Amino acid sequence: MRLEILKDEEAMSRRAAEVIARAVREKPDLVLGLATGGTPVGTYRELVRLYREGRIDFARVTTFNLDEYVGLEPHDPRSYHAYMEEHLFRHVNLRPEATHLPDGWAEDLEAECRRYEALIEAAGGIDLQLLGIGRDGHIGFNEPGARWEQGTRVVRLKPETRQDNARYFGGVLEAVPERAISMGIRTIMHARRLLLLAAGPHKAEIVRRAIEGPVSRHVPASILQLHPDALVLLDECAASQLTRARALARRQEQASG
Ligand code: GLP
């Protein structure tokens, strides 16, 4: 796992967009895994800027999002479908048929999970997966205790996660769906590269547990320690509780000039 600590959230977002843009330049038909939440908003803003400047071309890129709530229509402004339209899709030249999110409105949710997993496989697997981290260590919507061998599936959200996401639902906890469809840990770990972002002091403790703690099902993000090509980008606040990893990041930085 490689770690870079950037001075603030804006610098982290710029760096993340740069990593993605370089991956697209190297492989124009990149299969890109996308994430939602507050953290990647700045990264999408940067990607839109790079696109407008002609420095990234999404014409041949395919995308797969990590997750979607169950029971929200795709046009519901609180859905991750709507989030992606607002922050990225409508601003760049991604082909609509090349963008994918699980359908949380599907009648047969189990069939939808199988369909999504098969679509990823048919696309040749994910080349680069963007990730955020929940305060309880979840990635996608894989909550603590999630089994590592699982693919895309229906998950039940923990109260803490629903509370954190209530801000998108007018602050009303009861309005936050109790279930979601999420890529599983196995799906995520099969991606050839992972790019995890975390910013802000409220992420410092979970970042420390994920990066410096033992690899454990109680902290789903800790599995990134076992991925052969994972890059973690943190701002100073999110990195503030790191000890060993921080020293390592500094040494890596010095070594690379
Ligand atoms: C949601 C998403 C996760 C995301 C997490 C953290 O639960 N399903 O993919 O990483 O929120 O969100 P934020 O970036 O807003 O802290």
Image (tube, rainbow, N blue to C red):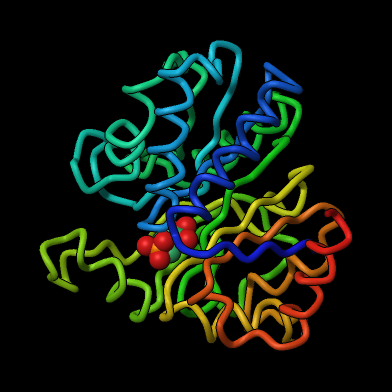
Residue 143 position within the rendered picture, expressed as x and y whole percent measured from the top left: 53, 72
Above or below: residue 131 compared with residue 158: above
Instruction: Please tell me in which quarter of the rendered image ligand 1 is found.
Output: bottom left
Residue 136 position within the rendered picture, expressed as x and y whole percent measured from the top left: 49, 80
Please tell me which residue is depicted at 59% across the width and 20% down the height of the picture. Answer: 61
Residue 86 position within the rendered picture, expressed as x and y whole percent measured from the top left: 27, 34
Please tell me which residue is depicted at 28% across the width and 45% down the height of the picture. Answer: 79
Above or below: residue 11 compared with residue 139: above
Which quarter of the picture shows residue 231?
Answer: bottom right
Image quadrant holding the C terminus, namely bottom right
Q: Is residue 174 left or right of residue 68?
A: left
In the foreground, 65 or 50:
50
Please tell me which residue is depicted at 13% across the width and 69% down the height of the picture. Answer: 171
Q: Is residue 255 left or right of residue 47?
A: right
Above or below: residue 46 compared with residue 149: above
Residue 96 position within the rendered picture, expressed as x and y whole percent measured from the top left: 42, 16
Q: Is residue 68 left or right of residue 119?
A: left
Image quadrant holding the N terminus, namely bottom right
Please tell me which residue is depicted at 18% across the width and 42% down the height of the picture. Answer: 77
